[in-house]
Amino acid sequence: MGREPKNKERYHLKFIEQIVQEIENGASQNSVIREYSLNKSTLNRWVKKYASPEYHATRKNKVYSESLKRQVVHSITEHHMTAQEACIMYG
């Protein structure tokens, strides 16, 4: 499936792109690591190098102010909003 012998740990670009595509499509890192017997740092390096800019943009950690957090909690508890609705409303 695109893998070369394990002794050198070199992979074909098509194989790497396939793996990264699986991650972008929602596969968990742990499941991909298990399925393809990959090292976690190798997978992280591939994702960092080959994943689309759109994927990277969605993975950035966001910092939210205390007041925004309180607004979200208030909306969920007082207005019976679901967490998903709050995410859509507040970003």
Image (cartoon, grey):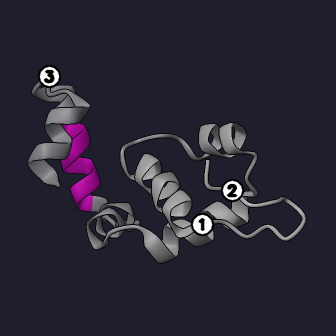
Above or below, comparing residue 42 to residue 35 in the picture: below
Secondary structure under the numbered disc 1 in the rendered image: loop
Please count the marks in the image.
3
Identify which residue, 4 or 45, lies in the foreground: 4
* Residue at 68%, 44% in the rendered image: 36
Mark linked to residue 12: 1
Density class for disc 1 (Cα within 10 Å; few <14, some 14-19, many ≥20) is few
Quarter of the image for residue 9 reads: bottom right
Residue where numbered disc 2 is placed:
3
Above or below, comparing residue 76 to residue 39 in the picture: above
Secondary structure under the numbered disc 3 in the rendered image: loop
Residue where numbered disc 3 is placed:
80
Camera-side mark, 1 or 3? 1
Q: Residue 60 location in percent, x, y?
A: 38, 68
CA gap between label 2 and label 1 equals 6 Å
70 in the magenta segment: yes
